Amino acid sequence: MTAPAACILGCAGLTLAPDEAAFFREADPWGFILFARNVADPAQLRALTGDLRASVGRDAPIFIDQEGGRVARLGPPHWRSWMAPLDHVAAAGTGAARAMALRYRLIAAELRALGIDGNCAPTCDVATADTHPFLRNRCLGTEAGEVVRHARAAAEGLLAGGVLPVLKHIPGHGRATADSHLALPVVSADAQTLWQSDFAPFAGLRDMPIAMTAHVVYTALDPDLPATLSPAILGLIRGRMGYDGLIMSDDLSMGALRGTLGELAAAALGAGCDVVLHCNGDRAEMARIVEAAGRLGGGAAVRAARALARRREPDALDEAAAEAELGALGHG
């Protein structure tokens, strides 16, 4: 059996057109990712996830960004609404870790019911006074230790619900003052500060199955290349940080990166990413990604298999009891 392509791709709309399904059958991406453009209602989403897996003939992972708060592809009337993570942590106080476990266990239940088994959450970046507004209230704390506690609880809640967590944005995006969707952030903090603060949550969560890179330049480690494209930084993530899970790039079509999509895919994989992410569903762009990415092999294939092995049948959940406990912990 041929190995899948070393990429995760988006699809165009609410349904999978025959020509789109044929493209995915030939391209055979390792996984898929969904966005608001792909969401109407539960029945439609269940059909779409089924069709995506049928197009590649296997139980491919399907991801979504469902942090809750501003970054939520699912919302009322079919799915729950949530406070921003940092606001929820503040409201829960000393019960924040338990609140994050319950929050993401309930989110996992909603995702699994739709055929979605990967969530690009939790955000493990450390919030600072200068963190760009696009990111700040998506974080889980303002110091490394509390981020580790809250992010671990969130990740374990997802895993208990049969959903793979994706830590983001490794090695740490919180000190960036630009929005990487639009421009390339440059962080000039010294290496010691980065390792003691920004990078520490990811070291503390090194046992988690998947992490997504930061499109951020850290001048103390590599003055030229963002982490996604930097062999030096990805080498430190594998070495000093000790992270041996699957590393996926952030979206290669974001404004932070310069170069053709083929060049970026090859550079990210060459630097040490295991799979590359492309989100907008543009067929011509996806074809260039697939061609440049090649097939999943070597250590990347081992890490991908190990990540998928972390998927499991959900633990039992009393949703009413979980919601009542969350309410007592300050969720509004």
Image (tube, rainbow, N blue to C red):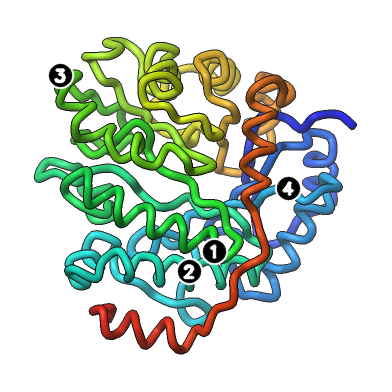
Numbered mark located on residue 160 in the image: 1
Please tell me which residue lies in front, 288 or 147: 147
The nearer-to-camera label among 2 and 4 is 2
Residue 313: % across, % down:
67, 64
Q: Report the amino acid beneath label 4.
A: Ala
Of the numbered discs 2 and 3, the one sitting upstream in the chain is 2
- Left or right? Give the position of 301 relative to 185: right
Q: Count neighbours of disc 4 (C-alpha within 10 A) and say few if under 14, some if 14 to 19, many if 20 or more.
A: many
Of the numbered discs 4 and 3, the one sitting upstream in the chain is 4
- Quadrant assignment, res 113: bottom right
Q: Report the amino acid beneath label 2.
A: Arg
Residue at image mark 3: 190
Are the residues flagged by discs 2 and 4 in contact, CB closer than 8 Å? no
Q: Quadrant of the N terminus?
A: top right
Q: Report the amino acid beneath label 1.
A: Ala
Q: In the image, is residue 103 above or below residue 118?
A: below
Residue 167: % across, % down:
43, 44
